[in-house]
Amino acid sequence: MKILVTGGTGFLGQHLTRVLLMAGHTVSMMGRDFSQVLPSLRKEAVPIICDLRDKNAVKQACRDKDAVYHVGALSAAWGKRADFFAINVEGTRAIVEGCREHNVKRLIYVSSPSVVFMGADQRNVTEALPYPRRFVSVYSLTKKLGEDLVNAAASELETVIVRPKAIFGPGDRTLLPQLIAAARRRRLPQIGDGRNLVDLTYVENVARALLLALNTAAAIGKTYTITNDEHILLWEVIRKVLQELLLSTQLRQIPLSVALTAAAMMEARAALTGTEPLLTCYSATILARTQTYDITAAKRDLGYAPSTSVATGIEHTLAALKEQEA
């Protein structure tokens, strides 16, 4: 098939592109900056330099494609509200319109479990959980609005929504690297009591789940949460990572209520100065709350099963980080 991957130059986008190429597909990678793209992908994939805010260019990128993976998004704990809407909502709108105009058969939208996160502990959540009345971040809100646009197009396109939780792996520049960087500056406290369970997802598992969503008839019109199917103690894993990197595991414990108060003050200051806060209310809550998911639907319909465990994935990620720093 001829496939477009938006956000193809990003962390998940590059892993997905490689998996699609290995499966024999012709892949066009859409992104703004190709400087960090692996040389092998530059040779094998078709590059499309495009910003999701350029509506006409986005729609044109959908021409002659059999399927589109909409991976690209502004995924951050902090940023301008207008940018989140322009990229995550209007960019998705342009993709949907491009798929319609150019008769794309299947649109697979990469969303986030944060669209149903309410800020409190959540255990074994399924896709049936309704959206909250209030969203924990503008990112979560705009990803939900993106889901609305995709679901509205389900009568004209074969749509599938995939919500991977906390993606990590080689090439990740956000999840583990940011925690490690904070620890190296001795600016990483343990938020909460450290007993919160979370689901992490190794990037290769996500890429293979997305591949399964490409041809599965039972997936059309549905939404799937993807995880490693392991409920782990988040702070225990963080300490193991720090120990492996010979960093201190003695982290100052801060109650979530205190962290939220401090984060709110930092966000207020950031709104005035334009500089990113060290901590946001969204980040504090994510680090302190239990968030586990039931992926029965993905197992049943997609035949999904994670092939790489969290422990093995952490090993691969640390090895890549050490090689990068060598």
Image: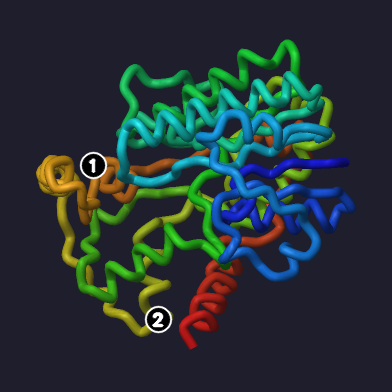
Say what secondary structure mark 1 lies in: helix
* Image x and y of residue 227, in percent: 58, 46
Q: Is residue 89 above or below residue 182?
A: above
Q: Is residue 198 left or right of residue 138?
A: right
Separation of disc 1 and disc 2 at Cα?
28 Å
The residue carrying mark 1 is 281
User: How many numbered circles are shown?
Assistant: 2
Q: Earlier in the sequence, mark 1 or mark 2?
A: 2
The amino acid sitting under disc 1 is Cys
Viewer can see residue 300: no
The residue lying at 66 percent from left, 68 percent from top is 38
The residue lying at 73 percent from left, 19 percent from top is 100
The residue carrying mark 2 is 245
The residue lying at 60 percent from left, 44 percent from top is 50
- Quadrant where the N terminus sits is top right
Query: Of the residues tagged 1 and 2, which is closer to the observer?
Result: 1
Say what secondary structure mark 2 lies in: loop
Q: Residues within 10 Å of mark 1 (few under 14, many from 20)?
A: many
* Image x and y of residue 21, in percent: 82, 55
Q: Is residue 20 left or right of residue 293?
A: right
Q: Is residue 232 left or right of residue 154?
A: left
* Image x and y of residue 326, in percent: 49, 88
Q: Is residue 92 left or right of residue 43?
A: left
The quarter of the picture where residue 52 lies is: top right
The quarter of the picture where residue 64 lies is: top right
* Image x and y of residue 201, in percent: 56, 52
* Nearest the eye: 91 or 121: 91
Q: Is residue 274 above or below residue 66?
A: below
The amino acid sitting under disc 2 is Leu
The residue lying at 62 percent from left, 18 percent from top is 151
Viewer can see residue 132: yes
